[in-house]
Amino acid sequence: MKVMERVNWHSPSPEQLWLFNRRVLGRKPRRLSKQSIRQVQAARKKFLHFVYRTNFDFMPKTTKLRVKIFDHMSQDARITIARYLESMRATSNFEAHRRSGSQRIFQGFCTITKSTKKYILKHKAEELREVFVIGELALRFHFYFLGVSRCDAAGWILDDVRSDELQAITDVARYLTQKAKVWKVPKHCTSYRQFQGQKPNELRLMLRQKIQTQAEGTKLASFPNSNNQKSRKRRTKKKLIRSGKEGNRNDSIDHEHDQALKDFLNE
């Protein structure tokens, strides 16, 4: 039995979409035009961003959220994206609106449940690979800058980062800020104006407690012994003032930070 090659959904070819329809979904394959392929790619990205951004914490298993996220697509593209969503435990619905004469414009709605993201993370994690790559590169650089060897710094989130996924990053803060504009911070499903379900009692209190717990855990992990760190900072500052190097300290740290990242990416 032949093993099907992995479909690259970042830039799928017509043959890959044909194989996906035939072997994965078990349906009759559809030959897509170049325009339909572009529409499928855009719709897929919108769906993954929608799933990643939506949080269903403390909600019942039957909770659903239906939001309009798809633009106009051809019939072949609508059928392909509908089958793709079925494989991700989600559903789609397209409504037709007449513009002029017999021309119709379709608007697509996507419906996800509490189990959609869990299913994707467990069985279809490759679909959210870009998020894992961003986290892996940021963590690798952080360990590398702290003096950890490249072998020990790699593989905490992903151990198979490809060479084409590495990026020439000159400013880590700017890089993460740009990525945050695409992969936005998740928000609760009840924050959507399209949400029509019932909110559990004390939902706001449980969400506030979760945020406080995460903040406390982050603070403890970042500052395990704040008193000792403050005393060390005071002693270091005094030494820098005496030696007249305090003014150039921040510039030297930024230069070492950028140089360490360049060395790590060029290895």
Image (spheres, rainbow, N blue to C red):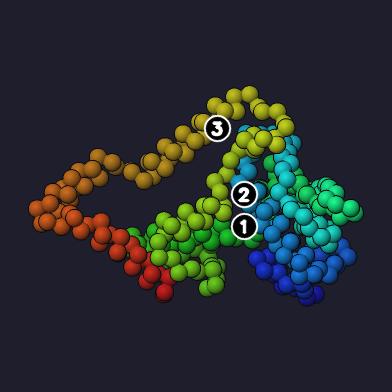
Q: Is residue 189 left or right of residue 220?
A: right
Residue 96 % position (x, y)? 84, 49
- Residue at the location (64% across, 61% down)? 126
Residue density around tag 1, few if under 14, some if 14–19, many if 20 or more, within 10 Å: some
In front of the other: 163 or 94:
94
Question: Which mark, residue 207?
Answer: 3
Q: Amino acid at mark 3?
A: Leu
Label 1 secondary element: helix
For the residues labelled 3 and 1, the Cα–Cα distance comes to 25 Å
Residue 137 % position (x, y)? 47, 62
Please say whether residue 96 is visible from this viewpoint: no
Q: Amino acid at mark 2?
A: Tyr
In front of the other: 116 or 190:
190
- Residue at the location (55% across, 72% down)? 164
Counting residues from the start of the chain, the first of labels 3 and 2 encountered is 2
Residue density around tag 3, few if under 14, some if 14–19, many if 20 or more, within 10 Å: some
Q: Amino acid at mark 1?
A: Leu
- Residue at the location (85% across, 49% down)? 98
Q: Judge whether 267 appears above or below 65 on screen.
A: below
Residue 210 % position (x, y)? 52, 34
Position of the C terminus, as image quadrant, is bottom left
Residue that mark 1 sits on: 128
Counting residues from the start of the chain, the first of labels 1 and 2 encountered is 2
Label 3 secondary element: helix
Position of the N terminus, as image quadrant, is bottom right
Q: Is residue 225 left or right of residue 184?
A: left
Q: Is residue 182 left or right of residue 97?
A: left
Check whether the beta carbons of the residues at disc 1 and disc 2 lie within 8 A of each other.
yes
Counting residues from the start of the chain, the first of labels 3 and 1 encountered is 1
Where is residue 132, by image quadrant?
bottom right
Where is residue 6, by image quadrant?
bottom right
